[in-house]
Image (spheres, rainbow, N blue to C red):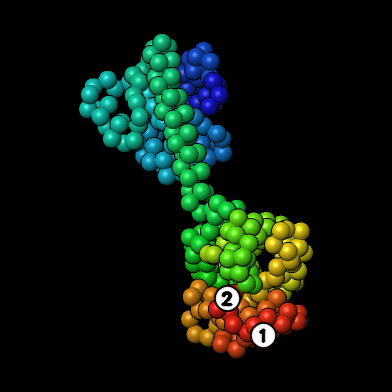
Amino acid sequence: MPRVAQVLVIDDDPTSARALKTAVEACGHAASIALTWTEAVRMFSRDAVDIVLMDAVMPTVDGYKLTQILRSRSRSYVPIVFTTGLNDMRARERCVAAGADDVLTKPVDPPELNLRLMAMLRIRKLTLELETRRGEMATIAMRDQLTGLQNRRSFDENLRNEIARARRYGRPLGLMVADIDHFKKVNDTMGHDLGDELLQQLGHLMMSQVRAPDMAFRYGGEEFVILTPETESTLALNLAERVRLGFKTRSASLSTGSQTLSIGLADTSMLTGEITGRQLFKIADAALYEAKRSGRNRVCVAKSQGDPMATTQPGDGDENDRGES
């Protein structure tokens, strides 16, 4: 928090507003004036405001109602201090009940104003720090720490949102499910450290290949998924091939040697009946199984629900059993 605070003075009396603005600036802070409630809402929404100093009694929309409006529009907690000519305890209690953090009696005493501003700025600073920390923790909770991709929890949430959007607007949603071939063998024969390195390389590759609004996730173990909103699976085939070929090339430089991916693609246009995330994942996973069954190291696009079709790339002649991935 910078030393200079941005203070919004809200008062329908121009003379009183200018006097309070001058007093705030004398305390070393910046101040702007709103003479009407509509102007106050506009300035509060547009500008970075640290503290609001607001007259409790104003025409049309008084400070009590305006506090509720500002609170509902605030993306971060901003302290609100009422200024009022009423000095009885009931009036002060009403101000606090309406959402004010403090109350100053008019005419405002400059030293008292400075103390209240210092206290409110401390609240503002601590609130911003807590909000930042909470945001960081939320990000960590939705992120796979090994690969840097979003995790299963984030995938489930984004899939729900994108399915709802696909239903609402009738637009396609594509889903790519990728699985590292014979990953268990890598872990068993070369060690989990090299297995982790392989997972990291795939995560970095996916991050470099996806473009907004596409989203990449580590689903679990050696399985990864990519959501492609507004995209049918046939159009996502180029992305899938870039990931498949890129992984084979990148892994060749590791101690594991060149490794391969099997990928299944599906989209909501293939679903019959109700469009759900579970059904979309089911047919994409079936396409992945078909890619494994038909030789691995390939992309398989589902033609329709329950009817997968292997596509362009030949397999590597491995066993036709997905059991060992």
Left or right for 249, reference 310 = right
Count of marks overlaid on the render: 2
Residue that label 2 marks: 324
| Nearer to us in this view, 317 or 88 | 317
The answer to whether residue 237 is seen in the rendering is: yes
Task: Say which residue appears at 47% left-offset and 28% top-offset.
Answer: 125
Above or below 152: residue 95: above
Q: Nearer the viewer, mark 1 or mark 2?
A: 2
The amino acid on which the numbered mark 1 sits, given as a three-letter code, is Ser
Horizontal and vertical percent for residue 270? 59, 83
Task: Say which residue appears at 52% left-offset and 49% top-offset.
Answer: 139
Left or right for 240, reference 67 = right
Gap in Å between the C-alphas at discs 1 and 2? 14 Å
Residue that label 1 marks: 294
Horizontal and vertical percent for residue 244? 72, 69
Image quadrant occupied by the C terminus: bottom right
The answer to whether residue 216 is seen in the rendering is: no
